């Protein structure tokens, strides 16, 4: 039975051409070898699993190849290449700086540098995780790194370049490796799946690539894990089930409910997600990323930033057409705010539910300004409109002008007057025309007068109701603190929100609310929002007679006991009988 080799090792690149996602760096290295312009020290830095150590090995193999190819690759046939492929080459020395980070390890390395290579031109020293070296080891390595023998070449690899001292950085050529794109990872996984005779859905491979976060080694490790779980048939459902990934289908359902302002459906979907064991912050981050992806799909120029399959991308495009830019901007802002407050919240589920409620209200609040109401104006009579205007009394002319000004900025849709069918008996019309016309005029005049009188009466009644609407409900200190905190949580300004949460308003006599702040800046911020706060509290407390006063506390130099002696003296000042206790028991204060 053959020994099983994981895909990350089995499909590790052996040539520059097979390195995925680092074409610019591999081209630079091949050109340096072809032009014989090799530096004595290189620093390969970048995220995990992007090919730093692999490129270092390929580079070491290629510069010692005795018969290099025209494209800059090694021949894999000479003695040096065979020794490298069989892991028996003495020209390549690898050191793990994570476990060999002392000065003695570096001195041992510098002693070996003096020995020339047996086969080939160069002796290559690959130091992985070089940032783990101690400061003394770095200093012991400086001289050798700056002026090594002509046959020695150093390749340093690290994931944390900022931890390397500047004197080391100045002696190396620095190559920054990029994260591998999702499309490149998916293509390579398809290649591996084809070689292993494994059936895999492209959407499943795309999910694996997103989970790998730009690292090919992580992607191949996840690929092996899913293959073992699914038995060689990788589907999207098997991937999200095995990796415990929150399916994007949930986010589409939440978005549909939010656009419909169906808060109940949102809460039920959230409960379903939490019941499956997903972390609340993962849900918030996923929702923010979902709205970000929808925003990216709004513009054909930015849709290239969204790396998913075509079928899923089409669903995101359809969702983007249903959401306005203002809605997406505010939804992303609210989700990010919830993410920042999640760590400090004691009721984390309520925080997420409040997020969904606030997002569901955005469609109601963000009404486009250009949407104007259409008003239908029907004629009062079925006769000529000009004749009806002539019948208007003189007192109704100003009212007509005011109504015309009110509908001036709206789209007016006037229904044309439909002509009445002509009766066959013309003589009967001529005999009754004068009497019917006069009767119609009298009825119209009377109806217009009644309309004017009724409108004035309704207007006066409405004014009286407004004047009589006085709310003076009695409320307690607990009610005041509750709704004060509720308004603070709804505030968009984080500085003002934290200020209000750290302040307790005081209810005094006659609906007087006193607020003490710590500095004038807080006082200014609260005074700017005082009208909104009073309006909110009046609505919640059913009392519009409250008065809000904001003052700045005076700085008092109070004595604060720190040492044991200070604390004891402070206690004796409050209770002098403690001195008798010390004397009776012969106590001593350390």
Image (tube, grey):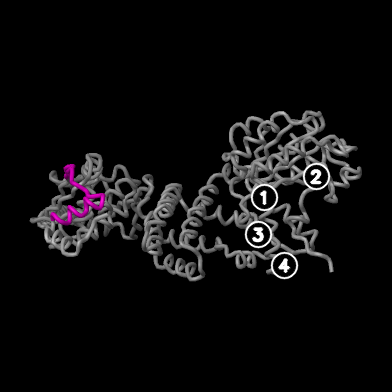
Q: CA distance from mark 4 to mark 1?
A: 25 Å
Q: CA distance from mark 2 to mark 3?
A: 29 Å
Q: Which residue is mark 4?
A: 233
Sequence-earlier tag: 4 or 3 = 3
Q: CA distance from mark 4 to mark 3?
A: 13 Å
- Lateral position of residue 536 relative to residue 348, left or right: left
Task: Give, as a single range, the part of the protein colored magenta.
Answer: 551-573
Q: How many residues crowd mark 2 within 10 Å: few (<14), some (14–19), many (20+)?
A: many
Residue 141 vs 516, above or below: the answer is above
Residue 190: image location, x then y, percent? 74, 56
Q: Which residue is mark 2?
A: 15
Q: Which residue is mark 3?
A: 203
Q: How many residues crowd mark 4 within 10 Å: few (<14), some (14–19), many (20+)?
A: some
Residue 560: in magenta span: yes
Q: Are marks 2 and 3 in contact (CB under 8 Å)?
A: no
Number of marks present in the image shown: 4
For numbered disc 4, what is the local secondary structure?
strand
């Amino acid at each position: 039975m053959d020994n099983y080799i994981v895909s990350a090792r089995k499909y590790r690149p052996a040539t520059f051409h097979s390195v995925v996602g680092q074409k610019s760096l591999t081209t630079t290295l091949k050109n340096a070898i072809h032009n014989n312009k090799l530096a004595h020290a290189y620093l390969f830095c970048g995220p995990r699993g992007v090919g730093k150590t692999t490129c270092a090995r390929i580079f070491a193999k290629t510069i010692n190849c005795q018969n290099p190819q025209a494209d800059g690759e090694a021949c894999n046939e000479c003695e040096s290449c065979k020794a490298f492929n069989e892991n028996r080459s003495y020209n390549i020395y690898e050191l793990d700086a994570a476990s060999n980070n002392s000065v003695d390890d570096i001195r041992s390395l510098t002693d070996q540098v003096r020995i020339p290579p047996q086969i080939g031109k160069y002796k290559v020293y690959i130091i992985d995780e070089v940032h783990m070296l101690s400061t003394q080891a770095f200093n012991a390595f400086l001289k050798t790194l700056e002026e090594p023998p002509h046959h020695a070449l150093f390749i340093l690899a690290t994931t944390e370049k900022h931890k390397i001292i500047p004197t080391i950085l100045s002696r190396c050529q620095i190559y920054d490796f990029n994260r591998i794109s999702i499309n490149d990872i998916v293509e390579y996984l398809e290649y591996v799946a084809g070689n292993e005779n494994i059936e895999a859905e492209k959407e499943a491979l795309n999910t694996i690539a997103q989970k790998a976060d730009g690292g090919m080694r992580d992607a191949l490790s996840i690929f092996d894990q899913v293959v073992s779980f699914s038995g060689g048939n990788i589907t999207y459902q098997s991937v999200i089930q095995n990796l415990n990934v929150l399916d994007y289908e949930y986010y589409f359902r939440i978005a549909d409910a939010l656009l419909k302002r169906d808060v109940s459906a949102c809460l039920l979907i959230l409960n379903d997600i939490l019941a499956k064991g997903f972390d609340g912050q993962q849900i918030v981050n996923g929702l923010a990323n979902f709205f970000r992806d929808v925003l990216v799909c709004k513009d054909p120029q930015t849709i290239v930033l969204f790396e998913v399959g075509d079928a899923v991308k089409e669903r995101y495009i359809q969702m983007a057409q249903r959401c306005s830019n203002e809605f997406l901007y505010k939804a992303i802002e609210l989700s990010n705010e919830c993410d920042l407050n999640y760590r400090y919240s004691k009721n984390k589920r309520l925080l997420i539910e409040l997020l969904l409620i606030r997002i569901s209200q955005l469609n109601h609040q963000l009404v486009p300004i250009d949407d104007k109401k259409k008003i239908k104006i029907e004629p009062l009579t079925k006769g000529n409109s000009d004749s009806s205007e002539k019948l208007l009394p003189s007192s109704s002319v100003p009212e007509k002008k005011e109504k015309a000004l009110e509908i001036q900025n709206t789209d007016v849709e006037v229904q044309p007057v439909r002509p009445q069918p002509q009766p066959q008996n013309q003589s009967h019309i001529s005999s009754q025309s004068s009497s019917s016309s006069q009767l119609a005029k009298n009825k119209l005049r009377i109806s217009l007068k009644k309309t004017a009188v009724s409108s004035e009466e309704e207007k006066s009644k409405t004014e009286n109701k407004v004047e009589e609407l006085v709310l003076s409900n009695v409320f307690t200190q607990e009610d005041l603190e509750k709704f004060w905190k509720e308004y603070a949580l709804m505030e968009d300004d984080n500085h003002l929100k934290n200020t209000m949460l750290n302040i307790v308003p005081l209810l005094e006599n006659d609906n007087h609310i006193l607020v003490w702040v710590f500095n004038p800046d807080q006082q200014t911020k609260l005074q700017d929002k005082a009208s909104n706060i009073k309006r909110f509290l009046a609505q919640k407390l059913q009392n519009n007679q409250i008065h809000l006063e904001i003052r700045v506390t005076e700085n008092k130099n109070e004595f604060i006991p720190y040492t044991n002696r200070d604390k004891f003296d402070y206690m004796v000042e409050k209770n002098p009988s403690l001195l008798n206790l010390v004397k009776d028991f012969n106590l001593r204060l350390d």
